Image: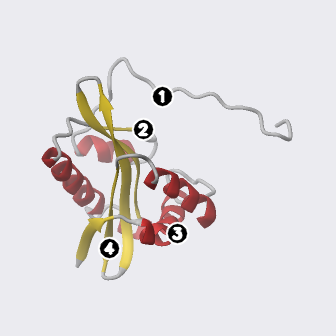
Amino acid sequence: MYTMRKLNRSDLSYCARLYVQSFNAEPWNDHWTAPAARKRLQDILDTPRFYGLIITAGDEPIGAVLGNFEHWYDRNHYNLKEMFVHPDFQGAGIGTRIMTRVRSDLLKRNVQGIYLVTTTSGGVSRFYTRNHFKKIEGMQMMGLKFPSRNGT
C-alpha cells in the first residue's frame, strides 16, 4: 500500500538516499553522494513557498517531489525542482500517482501551471509528455560553466 504526504525536514535523510539511488542510475548516471544530495534537497526545502510530497510503500520512501510556488506578473506557478522515484518502482505508475496529486493540490491553490527542466534522454521526457506537459516554444535552457579551482 502506498501513502503520500507532505514532505518535511525529518524526511531529508531518507530522501537524500533515495535521490542518490534514483539519479545515479539510468538515464542520468550522476555521481551523487548522500551528503551532497541532502544539501541539494535542503536548499529546495528552504526555498520560500516550498511544496513537496513523499510517497512511501509501508514505511519505505519510494518517491518524492520538491519545488516551490512562484509569482509571475499575472499568476502563480509551481517550479518543480526535483521529482524522483526509486529505480525498482519506476514504470509502476508511482510517478504518475505523484504528478496527479501535485496537479490536484495546485489546482486547489489556484496555481496556473507547472514548470520544470528535465533530460531528453531515456523515458523521462516521454513520462512528462504522457502527464500532459509540453515543450514551451520560444524557450530554452541555457547554462554557463565556470572553470574549477584547479584549472580544469
**Is there any visible trace of residue 70 in the rendered image?**
yes
Give coordinates of residue 109: x percent, y percent: 17, 46
Q: CA distance from mark 4 to mark 1?
A: 32 Å
Mark 4 or mark 2, earlier in chain: 4
Mark 3 surroundings: few (<14), some (14-19) or many (≥20) residues within 10 A: some
- Look at the numbered disc 4 and give the secondary structure of its residue: strand
Callout 4–callout 3 Cβ contact below 8 Å: no
Most extreme residue toward the left, as rendered? Answer: 108
Q: Which residue is located at x 33 percent, y 20 percent?
A: 137
Callout 4–callout 2 Cβ contact below 8 Å: no
Q: Which residue is located at x 51 percent, y 71 percent?
A: 13
Callout 2–callout 1 Cβ contact below 8 Å: yes
Residue under label 1, please give it.
141
Give coordinates of residue 31: x percent, y percent: 63, 56
Residue under label 3, please give it.
17
Mark 4 or mark 3, earlier in chain: 3
Give coordinates of residue 138: x percent, y percent: 36, 17
Instruction: Name the image quarter holding the N terminus.
Output: bottom left
